[in-house]
Image (cartoon, helix red, strand yellow):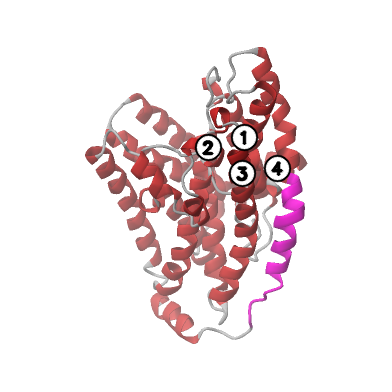
Amino acid sequence: MSQIVDPNAGGAERVVALDGLRGLMTAFVVISHYFAELPGGVNALMFGWVGVDMFFVLSGYLVGRLILEKSRHANFFSVFYIRRTLRIIPAYVVTIVIVSGLMAVCDPAWSGARDAFPLWAYLSFSQPFFMISSGSIGAHWLAPTWTLALEEHFYLLAPLVIVLAPRRLLPWLLAGTAAMAVLVRLTIHLLYPHNPMAALVLLPSRADLLCLGMLAAVAMTSWKVDWPRFDFALRLTPILALVAILGLKAVDSVVTDALMPLAMAVGCASFLLALVRDAPEARRFKSPVLRFLGDNGYCIYLTHIPVLGLMHGLILGQRPALETPAQWGVSLAALPVCVLVGWGMTKLIEEPLTRYGRSWRWSDARRAKIGAAAEAGAS
């Protein structure tokens, strides 16, 4: 899952409901990791995957919109990458270094240090390749970082694709890439049925989620759409997508495994656009609690599993599980602790450096070549 995108990154009027959406997805992931994806966990709470997929779509939308609105500036690339780096890298590196240090001094029986990939793999965002080669998630405390690695790969490529592609061809390019992701997943499941990890953690196999988010950004910024006519369809499509996903889940085959993320991408993109359009559902996402979780979601996401593992290890001397009342008690106690740790990191690291990144302003000078290319593409 990613939470490393500024909800107001595009410079347009802030959509408050998207802050709340980030907060709800943060809660989904934490609850799933704390109370479902553990021995003795509750299967009904295993909805963290919804949060992961929605965050990919949200990242595609927000970053795509930023690029579409700001790529005309002469200093676009330098400002874009400086701001992304300052927002993402410091909190990430601090987490990786501290958690790696904790795993080195804690009992490996419950810290999972023996399963860790090399430190440089996490620092270079190459852990997905280690996951594929080993067929494992590596150290459990650092397992969620694969989503951040995938998004870093996306950030490196997305500006070049959107800036260089003619605007009239961009929707077709994004749609084609989304279709390619389905074929990539299908190929992986067919060729490597016993180790389909690559279908989960590589950018080419997850590109449909990001591309549907970018397509939503193109629709909002570049297309002349009579949006009121489509508001009901935007609200209905997520329900139809959920029905389709449940139907696909009932049919156990490599084809359905390849198609489900695309159905999820369509549903998430439609729901996101409904919130941007201020559908009635948007009011629920303006909750101060959800917005607080959204504002602090990146650092909560980075640290919530190490907090859970450390508390279970130090208090009970074992890895997290939910098979006894004591284990349930520790997991419940870890919830406010992980929020406090995430909030502290946000205030001390993420927010100050993000503010500094915003001091790098977009220039008034226009990139002549990009402007000419966009005009040519639109003609």
- The disc, 3 or 2, on the residue closer to the chain's N-terminal end is 3
* Residue type at tag 4: Leu
Q: Is residue 18 visible?
A: yes
Q: Which label lies toward us, 1 or 4? A: 1
Q: Are marks 4 and 3 in contact (CB under 8 Å)?
A: no
Which residue is disc 2 drawn over?
Answer: 113
Q: Are marks 1 and 2 in contact (CB under 8 Å)?
A: yes
The numbered dot on residue 106 is: 1
Rounded to the nearest whole Å, what is the CA distance between mark 4 and mark 3? 22 Å
Q: Name the secondary structure under disc 2.
A: helix
Residue 207 versus residue 238: which sits nearer the camera? 207
Which residue is disc 4 drawn over?
Answer: 293
Residue 141 lies within the magenta run = no
Rounded to the nearest whole Å, what is the CA distance between mark 4 and mark 2? 29 Å
Query: Which range is magenta?
Result: 343-363
Residue 99, image x and y in percent? 61, 44
Local packing at callout 3 (Cα closer than 10 Å; few below 14, some 14-19, many 20+) is some
Rounded to the nearest whole Å, what is the CA distance between mark 1 and mark 3? 10 Å
Q: Quadrant of the C terminus?
A: bottom left
Q: Is residue 323 left or right of residue 147?
A: right
Local packing at callout 2 (Cα closer than 10 Å; few below 14, some 14-19, many 20+) is many
**Residue shown at 35%/62% (left/top)?**
173
